[in-house]
Image: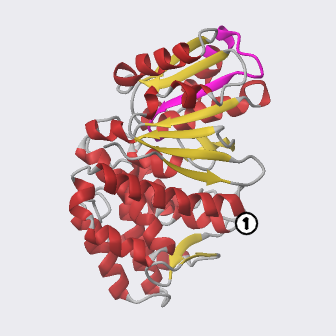
Amino acid sequence: MTASPRIVAVGGELPYRIHIGPGLQGDGQLLSAPIRGRHVLLVSDDTIAPLYLAQVRQTLLAARPELVIGQYIIPAGEASKTLDSFSGAINALASLGATRDACVFALGGGVVGDLAGFAAACWMRGVDCVQLPTTLLAMVDSSVGGKTAVDIAQGKNLVGAFHPPRAVIADTAVLRSLPPRELRAGLSEVIKYGAIRDPAFFQWLHSEREALLAGDDTALAQAIARSCEHKAQIVERDPLEKGERALLNLGHTFGHAIETAQGYGAPGNDNLNHGEAVAVGMVLAARLSAALGMADAADTGTLHALLLAYGLPVDIPAGLAPETLLAHMRLDKKNIAGRLRLVLWRGIGKAEVVPDVDEAAVLEVLQQG
């Protein structure tokens, strides 16, 4: 028997719902409900589009035959999250003749979601966007909260906008075909929620490790819902990341620096993907917290062991200079007046934003790897 879809409500000025469950991409009523006009642009990548785009298109047209649907496909991978790809999405909206009641559907992982959301935010100063995440990482993180962006050579996500979606529809059935590495990358972001504010969830992730790594539907749905509930609560209180929402970036300042230094490598190479870089970043943040006397080193060891148990990396990749990583960290969006502002912790479940962090201490942790 198929379990009923889970629904997580995100409140605030522009409320929306996150729908979680198997088979949702085939639910025409659910998919078409957020569409206010006739024009729809489906944005995807060349890995996901052959698998799911035709089904989504057919489902939408069966529910709303009058829809005019266009598509924009990018090469898969972080290297496509560029201003050039953004320009292509804008041109696709223009070719479609998209009006102000148009809707952009982001069918893919975090790269597609960020790019499509940014295009939706900018076309005619903002049209609707529906997130259809196809990776675990996107389901628990990037599809929720309305942060959209593209990368430039100087850093990750430096050009973007806040643009909450009209809906997030997470069809967990697509996770069954997710490569193991991508599943583990998503679980890195799930572990983050336990690390920043939920010790009980952190312990649950320890006990449910085998089920989650095996792709068990029930365990994954529970992990996704718990993660989204945490993010929804934080986003509702701090939609524009003026304070508490920065906690969601535990490990991200270090992780983004690693990604930037590696040049947002193409799929299939040895560079870390986003979830893997965040895993390393969380360990570095925990080590820095211990070095600053904020937390016990034993908590770092507990986090380190859990990430390893999930098959995630915990060390800085070889060949990345600590000084280069620190230079990239200086461009992080959380920094104020040129001073490092990092998310650190006082142990599992007790993250906090720390202003004016000593660069010498950061460099020492980076040098230790």
Residue 15 percent across, percent down from the top left: 71, 48
Residue 79 percent across, percent down from the top left: 43, 34
Q: What residue is at 51 percent from the left and 74 percent from the top?
A: 197
The residue under label 1 is 337
User: Helix, strand or loop at disc 1?
Assistant: loop
Q: What residue is at 51 percent from the left and 80 percent from the top?
A: 350
Q: Is residue 264 above or below residue 240?
A: above
The residue lying toward the viewer, choosing from 330 and 216, is 216
Location of residue 149 by image quarter: top right
Determine whether, in the image, residue 177 is placed left or right of residue 52.
left
Give the total of numbered labels: 1
Residue 4 percent across, percent down from the top left: 43, 46
Image quadrant holding the C terminus, namely: bottom left
Q: Is residue 323 above or below residue 170?
A: below
Determine whether, in the image, residue 97 is placed left or right of residue 198.
right
The residue lying toward the viewer, choosing from 324 and 211, is 211
Q: What residue is at 56 percent from the left and 18 percent from the top?
A: 63
User: Dot 1: within a 10 Å radius of its alpha carbon, few (fewer than 14), some, or many (20 or more) residues?
Assistant: few
Q: What residue is at 73 percent from the left and 66 percent from the top?
A: 337
Residue 315 in magenta stretch: no
Image quadrant holding the N terminus, namely: top left
The residue lying toward the viewer, choosing from 264 and 104, is 104
Q: As shown in the figure, which amino acid type bears the numbered disc 1? A: Ala
Q: Which residues are magenta?
A: 92-110
Residue 136 percent across, percent down from the top left: 39, 47
Q: Is residue 213 above or below residue 72?
A: below
Location of residue 335 by image quarter: bottom right
Residue 334 seen from this side: no
